[in-house]
Image: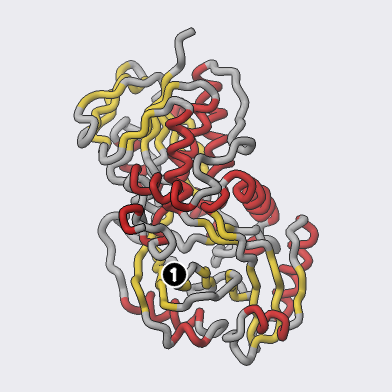
Amino acid sequence: MRRSTALVIGGGVTGVGVARDLAMRGVDVTLIERGGLSSGTSGRSHGLLHSGARYAEADPLGAEECIVENRTLREIAGECVADTGGFFVQVDGDDRDYYERKLRACRDLGIDAEDVDVEVARNAVPDLADDVVRVMRVPDAVVYPSRLVAATAESAAEHGAEIRTHAPLEGLRVEDGRIVAADVGGSVGGRIEAEYVVNAAGAWAGRCAALAGVEVRMRPTKGVMVSVDYPGLGPVLNRCRKPDDGDIVVPHESEAVLGTTSVEVDDPDEFDEEPWEVETTVEQCARMLPAVADAPVVRTWWGVRPLYAPDEEARREADEDARGISRDFVLLDHAAGGVENFATIVGGKLTTYRGMAEATADLTCEKLGVEATCETMNERLPGADDPAALDELVKKYDARSPSDEDVVAEPDAR
């Protein structure tokens, strides 16, 4: 029986997730990425695996999606995830009613949230600020994007997908309302033909869509991450206030990652890396954990969120400050725009990538006439139980990124 074919554009976590899902359903998949895997937004995050608690009181549906995918990734991703747990920390002067609303909302949604004594929290995190007044324990965790993306790509490859890195998209050829071929440079250096094309290029999705004559309006925002020398933190720390700049501290093995800001940019490749973002992030995170203000900065990096402009505009009309609302993903079927075999997936977040990929694969299979259901939640990722094997996959797919640089080892250095 002839296999249906699909091309996935973009080698971040969503793109490799789509490739894996389609390959597991028997679709003949090729994925292209202009650089190494995870070289865009996925590898430039703070690495928080959301429990949904951040969004519980403002966006229960988004929060519920997070806790479902949080549990799934713990099952399938092994050493791509560190089960650190998390605290929501309220300091003197923060809105105490906000804490109560979040705690109730988490419990209503089945998110395991517990009000813990401040001294118990201080035993876990001795450097907590002196003016901490309340602490809530939640099932947050840490995800290492380089490992997750590489292992997901390897799973796709094991199921027959072709993963092509350093293969930039140069053009899309459209005839009679269908993409008939993609022109790809770099390691491919030629044409790729496919029956269906998925645009998973993240913040660059608008540029890729334009090559097919389709408009996808993006509104990317940059955010800084600051990694400081601070080993042994333990749990993720979240400031228990309405989401704002500098309200997350993510533990790594020898460092703590402080995040983040949210500033609109015109170009996801060209933007100013402004000192005030670093200063604000450190200053605000130090309200929870004062020691980070004096900890040596190891490195800083910026990520660019792949936000869909119409969705962002609607969010802001509903709430002028909508950072407490979970950014849902948007799946666009471009048949309505005149290109029958083309879809774009944007938005969402790393925690929910598998669910985003499932929805995209559902649409793709419907268009291709493939009758197969999603199985990605049932099969563990290759190398999941072996950090060394995962780090070999990171090297294989050139997926090393700043988000987890202190965790992912260079195989040759072992």
Name the residue nearer the viewer: 372 or 98: 372
Q: Which residue, given by chain and number where applicable, does mark 1 sit on?
A: 261
Q: Residue at x 53, y 38 (%)?
A: 357
Q: Position of residue 355 (x, y in %)?
A: 58, 41
Q: Residue at x 38, y 62 (%)?
A: 405
Mark 1 Cα shell of 10 Å, populated few (<14), some (14-19), many (≥20): many
User: Which type of secondary structure does the marked residue at label 1 adopt?
Assistant: loop
Q: Residue furthest bottom?
A: 130
Q: Is residue 385 left or right of residue 224?
A: right
Residue 215 pos. (x, y %): 37, 38
- The quadrant in which residue 261 appears is bottom left
The amino acid on which the numbered mark 1 sits, given as a three-letter code, is Thr
List x then y, in percent, for residue 286.
50, 84
Residue 332 in view in this figure: no
Q: Is residue 10 above or below residue 299?
A: above
User: Would you identify the image quadrant in which residue 52 lies?
Assistant: bottom right
Which residue: 46% across, 33% down?
156
